[in-house]
Amino acid sequence: MLGSILSQYARSLAVLAIFLLMVLVEVLDIRDAIYPGLESFFNWMNQSSWIGVIGTTYGSVYATVEALHLLSMAVLGGTVLATDLRLLGIIFKDVPSETLVTGTHKCFGWALLMAILTGIFCAAGVANKVYFMEVFWIKMLVLIAGSCFMLFIKQPLLTSRPHTQINPWTIRLVAVTSMLIWFTVAANGRWIGFS
Amino acid sequence: MINELLLQFAHWMEAQEYSQMLVAGYYSYSWLEATHVLTLMISIGSLFIIDFRMLGWVMPNVPASTIAARLHKPMIIGFVIMFITGALLVYAKPVETIQSLWFRMKMILLLLAFINAWIFNNRLKTAEGNWDNDPVAPGPLRTGAIISLVLWCGVVTLGRYIPYDWVDCTNTTNTTILWAAGCVDQLNAL
Amino acid sequence: MNENGKIDDKTIAALSSAAIILGGLLYYWIGEGQSTVELLELAYGSFKFFNNPLVF
């Protein structure tokens, strides 16, 4: 009985487990216990890792990778906006939403991968600074939550059946959440430069 | 001659109260720049999806003209916001922007990108109908898409270089760079 | 809904995670907005796009 519920609602239980884990992390002050130990890793990233050394030594290489990071953000945002605005019924009204959901996913995946790889390089170049920035940690939290949401929640739901069989409010909620996630990631990313 | 006029114009803008207010504002310049950068997701994001479709990389099962037509409006809205915020960014820091080599190169690439977009649009109109459902667009349109991707990558990269001071008028003595960046005072002093 | 009329796993996961994330992000942005207004009001007496010492 329990086994069947576990397997039938595995995804929902995983969401619940992650939520409870986050509550525990906050309640038990685990974040405060882990945070100081990460400083040496960030310093190593900045001063000793080869990406950190390249980033801090060659300004032009760093700026070019920053530009690649922006370009991948643009493509990622483009695919997210095209898909989510279609899900909200604002654009692409004459193209089935299922077509957009499947058609843009691969491009989104590549853009996300590119953004993460260039982002690691950019973060390594200023790792000793971003370690102390709240806005950086919020970006990382939303990036991880957002990537999991897109890959393990949104896409599986929207490719599981025709969208007419999904409650329209569920679709709208998922679309708005996805847009706000990537806006937050991009805006906080830009704010790292101003902090 | 043109560089002297541009510099005079930049000094005139810099003396304006609103130009100074934009820079001195607690958040105004940051908000403006953040809006300029974030709007890339609407403008370049839409444009690249159109280009990618021409190359058959995204949604090859959707007619290319449909993708181009449906993304045209968001793309134009994005570019209008980018143009307004970009113009205000120049207005806020006119002298250093007008004398930036990267900014000048960016403007040239922007001009080339718009000429390419105009040619691309004309080709799209004349080519409509015969190939629309093909997963990959015909050769001339593919070439236009590749040129567009290269030019816009260049525009974004040069835009990202603008805040860096490697070749600012005060940081170089290379006469070619000083001439290209329009560093009037530094050239006169040589 | 699945064929038995029950809400299925993917829908529950989507609704719950979207509610948690959207709620968290709205809370974050409203908080950011409030703290920005408070900071500018404290520094300049009012909240304006052009808050700076040049404007009185």
Image (cartoon, rainbow, N blue to C red):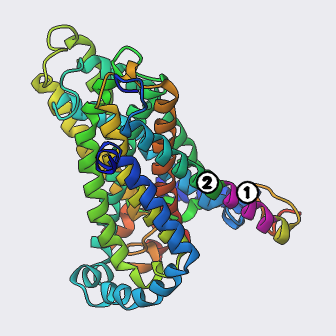
Q: Which mark is residue B16?
A: 1
Give the CA separation, mark 2 to mark 1. Answer: 9 Å
User: What's the chain of the residue with tag 2?
Assistant: B
Q: Judge the density around disc 1: few (<14), some (14-19), many (≥20) Cα neighbours within 10 Å.
A: few
- Give the x, y percent position of residue B109: 33, 46
Badge 2 and badge 1 in a common chain: yes
Is A72 located above or below residue B55 in the figure?
below
Camera-nearest residue between B188 and C53 = C53
Q: Secondary structure at mark 2?
A: helix
In the rendered image, residue B48 lying in the magenta stretch gets the answer no
Query: What range is drawn magenta here?
Result: C30-40
Q: Tell me which numbered mark, 2 or 1, is placed earlier along the sequence.
A: 1
- Tell whether label 1 touches label 2 (CB within 8 Å): yes
Q: Secondary structure at mark 1?
A: loop
Residue at x 40%, y 86% (from the top left corner): A38
- Report the amino acid beneath label 1: Gln
Q: Judge the density around disc 2: few (<14), some (14-19), many (≥20) Cα neighbours within 10 Å.
A: many
Q: Is residue B105 visible?
A: no
Quadrant assignment for the C terminus of chain A: bottom right
Q: Which mark is residue B91?
A: 2
In the rendered image, residue C38 lying in the magenta stretch gets the answer yes
Residue at x 71%, y 67% (from the top left corner): B24
Camera-nearest residue between A97 and B105 = A97
Q: Main secondary structure of the magenta part?
A: helix
Q: State which quadrant residue B124 falls in.
A: top left
